[in-house]
Image: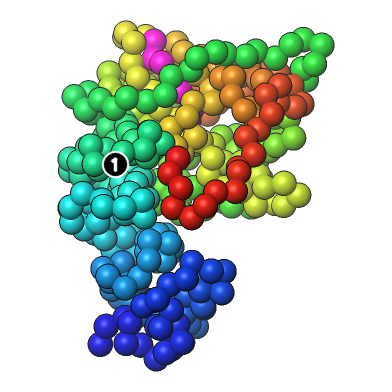
Amino acid sequence: MSYLDLSNADASATLKEPDKSAAFHSKIAAFLADPKDSKADRIRRLRELLRSSEADGFVKLQSLHDLALLDTESAVGEAEQVIRSGSPRSVEDENLFTASAALLGRMGRAEHLSDIEAAERDVTTEHGKQKIAFAGAMIAHRFGLFDRKFKLPQAKQLIAPKGFAATSFASKEPGTIRRGRAIEVVRVTFPWIEDANQEVREVSCGDRLMEIMLSRELTQGQGLEQIAKQPALPGFVAFSRPDEDTFYPALVVLSDPLDKQRIAVSVRRIDGEPVFVGEAILNAPTGFELALTTVSAPGVIAAAFKVNGKKDGFEITGQSEQRSRVAPNVPQRRAHGAQD
């Protein structure tokens, strides 16, 4: 029995003639969230929906997202299938291509670089190409690959906090519950990270609480010698949600060796845009000193960080302003199907 033949006839009908309305999307959401389904049934249904010619692009995007939450390997397999099925023929196809490549960047393996490179060639929008290039960069850095280069956005202008407008901050170790929540939300997006390998520090910067996670394997002891020789993905940053004690994965840390003792560090949004950039001096195997400054961009609060890595962890000190000097971008309402 195919996904589209399943019991809810009303929802099935909407798949055949999607009207892009809120009612349509809510029906699909209800259809996918049937509490009577087993996990295996939901995985099977989502995979069939992703391969259906009757479902629209929005539903397929949501299905890929939901599948990734349920089963990483199934989601990776479907993302492969999307990219290998041929060049996109519509805006909706491009969106699904981009999302599939981004998923492979977060959850895939080194062999998926060829799929990501193919997707980057096939999409036409600059924003799509940027997101796909960052997906490739994440895999290349995660597996320490020198020979696979991807063009990422560069920092055009840095902004340091002004003395009269800045407040000082210092990191502390988060409590067990907050540490666990932050790592849990990052693992939803990057399921390969290991809880026990994460050294976590908490910083209040401006009006946000940040949980900074660095890999013990890469930033302590002999790991510093490895990070001095090859690209790496040593950490993540999770931000708190306003007025809530929950977090979302916001930033990814990439490092690239400059010489035996210096590495370039960029801290980037999930779409590849740089937020902090700087340079680390390595004192392997005892520790490192890292200085980071914010990139001038909409919504970014000017800050300067100093990270002091030691054998038993790291400390962060710095200064930040309270508000962004550049107003955040406000999304504009666009017609369905409009390109970036």
**Quarter of the figure with the N terminus:** bottom left
Residue 15: quadrant of the picture = bottom left
The mark total stands at 1
Horizontal side of residue 261 vs 211, given as left or right: left
Residue 117: quadrant of the picture = top left
Secondary element at image label 1: loop
Where is 162 relative to 113, above or below? above
Where is 98 relative to 169, above or below? below
- Give how far across and how far down residue 201 sits, in percent: 60, 34
Say which of 36 and 324 sits in front: 324
Classified by dominant secondary structure, the portion drawn in magenta counts as strand
Residue at position x 43%, y 44% in the image: 339
Task: Sort mark 1 into few (<14), some (14-19) or many (20+) by Cα contacts within 10 Å.
Answer: many
- Give how far across and how far down residue 306 sits, in percent: 59, 17
Say which of 117 and 215 sits in front: 117
Where is 227 relative to 68, above or below? above
Residue at position x 31%, y 60% in the image: 75
- Give how far across and how far down residue 186 sits, in percent: 49, 47
Which residue position holds label 1? 123
- Give how far across and how far down residue 94 sits, in percent: 33, 49
Magenta-highlighted residues: 262-268
Residue 203 showing in the rendered view: no
**Quarter of the figure with the C terminus:** top left
Horizontal side of residue 225 vs 13, given as left or right: left
Residue at position x 67%, y 24% in the image: 326
* Amino acid tagged 1: Val
Residue at position x 48%, y 17% in the image: 155
Say which of 146 and 287 sits in front: 146
Residue 170 among magenta residues: no
